[in-house]
Image (cartoon, rainbow, N blue to C red):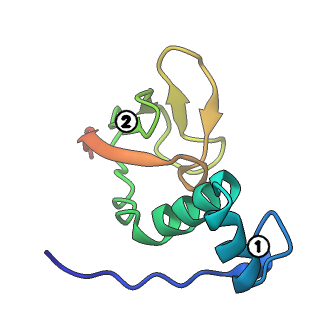
Amino acid sequence: MTAAVVTLDFAGAPFNGTPAQVIENLRDGGSIAREWIIGQIEAQTKPPKPAEPTGLGAVVEDEDGSLLVRIHGEAAPPPWQVVDGGSLWYWEGIDVARVLSEGVTA
């Protein structure tokens, strides 16, 4: 197992934001501090987003399990469409969990 280093940014804490406040909150039952720490760890240890597949018909799955398909070969208009919902997205706005198909390239 590889050890990970996580830095806590107390400026973004949903309370006073000092290390002492975090410790006090954790000792008092700590749900706010615990959830804040979990969020900080998850944000810093999340696997990197895969490279954008550029082939027409490429399919990706987002973190919520929704499927998106590449409907345009260019970035404008938004080239990604949610299969069930019809929403259009740019790659930057999709939290991709995995690439299912690279699509067809010319």
Q: Which mark is residue 61?
A: 2
Q: Residue at x 47, y 19 (%)?
A: 83
Residue at the left extreme, as displayed: 1
Q: Is residue 39 above or below residue 5?
A: above
Residue at the right extreme, as displayed: 16
Q: Residue at x 25, y 82 (%)?
A: 3
Which amino acid type is shown beneath numbered disc 1?
Answer: Gly
Q: Residue at x 62, y 41 (%)?
A: 78
Where is residue 27? Give x, y as percent.
62, 66
Closer to the camera in the image, 59 or 103:
59
Residue at the front extreme, as displayed: 28
Place residue 8 in its image quadrant.
Answer: bottom right
Where is residue 42? Give x, y as percent.
47, 61
Secondary structure under tag 2 reads strand
Which amino acid type is shown beneath numbered disc 2?
Answer: Glu
The first of marks 1 and 2 along the sequence is 1
Tag 1: Cα neighbours inside 10 Å, few (<14), some, or many (≥20)?
A: few
For marks 1 and 2, give the one nearer the viewer. 1
Tag 2: Cα neighbours inside 10 Å, few (<14), some, or many (≥20)?
A: some
Q: Is residue 16 above or below residue 5?
A: above
Secondary structure under tag 1 reads helix
Residue identified by numbered label 1:
12
